[in-house]
Amino acid sequence: MATKQHSSDRSIAQITNSFEIVEAYKTLRANLIFSMAPMSRKVIVISGPEPNTGKSTTSCHIAVMMAQTSKRVLLIDADLRRPKLHRFFRVNHAGGLTSHLLSGGDWEKCVCKEVAPHLDLMTAGPIPPNPSELLGSQRMSHFLDQVAEQYDYVFIDTSPINVVTDALVLSARTAGTVLVARQNQTGYDELQQAIEGIKKVNGTLLGVVLNDYQPSLSEEKRLAYRQYGYGEPNEKK
Ligand SMILES: Nc1ncnc2c1ncn2[C@@H]1O[C@H](COP(=O)(O)OP(=O)(O)OP(=O)(O)O)[C@@H](O)[C@H]1O
Ligand SMILES: [Mg+2]
């Protein structure tokens, strides 16, 4: 079982003291609340076209920000290839999602409670040989059904969409997917490919976060991103 090793009052202010970053995440949160309002199961996949776009960073920040509204939030590390969330919250990841999926039993025993106020974390657990199959399993579906009932919002950090199918398996069975693109890294074609992938599995694209935004981005490219999305959560000072 994942165990907590630090104080339970971790908040966004402890993650960053940048006013611009906090405000950008508040905008992202408001947009998510608005777009998720009609949906009864608020289970959201966070992914991106390629590695290193800031998927895990965005997942952590938006989960903490959402929990600050006093909603009950669960953050799941479903990147079973490069899991990172346990490091961000400094918890032990001996247990976690794969432990539950492989052995069954009570999923709540694999959850690390209150890593921040109102926020629980399910770490990835031991890396399995078959991540896509595990994430597409009946047990995973059942698990998602249960957490959707227990929490107001569930955020799922995943592997990159254009590289492995893991995230698409989850996009197909959740309320929506947020894509994280990174300035000066993610190309327009890569972003389109990820969007097409979500469409093919009948997933719902909630929006695109442009991470690591710098004002030098050309107006043309900025507009291309904005037509899909939420703006720039990690604007640099
Ligand atoms: N806006 C930003 N400004 C500066 N550094 C950032 C920003 N966003 C993310 N990073 C850094 O970039 C690296 C990758 O971020 P992160 O792990 O969130 O990406 P990822 O898409 O989840 O990667 P992976 O594909 O490996 O899962 C980390 O070192 C993180 O601290
Ligand atoms: Mg990641």
Image (cartoon, grey):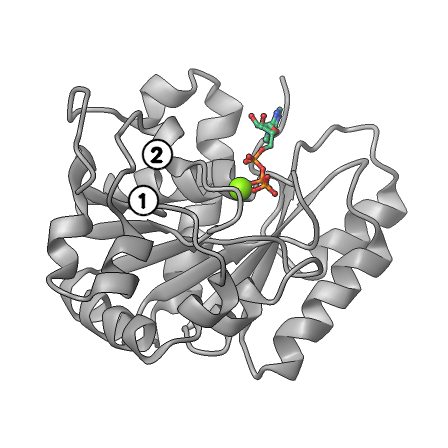
Image vertical order of residue 109 relative to residue 39, above or below: above
**Is 176 displayed left or right of 109 in the figure?**
right
Q: Do callouts 1 and 2 mark residues in contact (Cβ within 8 Å)?
A: yes
Q: Secondary structure at mark 2?
A: helix
Q: Could one spot residue 38 in this view of the protein?
A: yes
Q: Which residue does the numbered mark 1 point to in the structure image?
A: 123
Q: What amino acid type is highlighted by mark number 1? A: Thr
Which numbered circle lies on residue 86?
A: 2
Q: Crowdedness of circle 1 by 10 Å Cα count: few (<14), some, many (20+)?
A: many
**Is 118 displayed left or right of 185 in the figure?**
left
Q: Quadrant of ligand 1?
A: top right
Residue 3 % position (x, y) = 17, 33
In percent of the image, x 34 and y 39: which residue is there? Answer: 65
Image vertical order of residue 115 relative to residue 34, above or below: above
Splitting the image into 4 quarters, where does residue 59 fall? top left
Image vertical order of residue 26 relative to residue 194, above or below: above
Residue 48 % position (x, y) = 63, 53
Mark 2 CB near ligand 2 (8 Å cut): no
Q: Quadrant of the C terminus?
A: top right
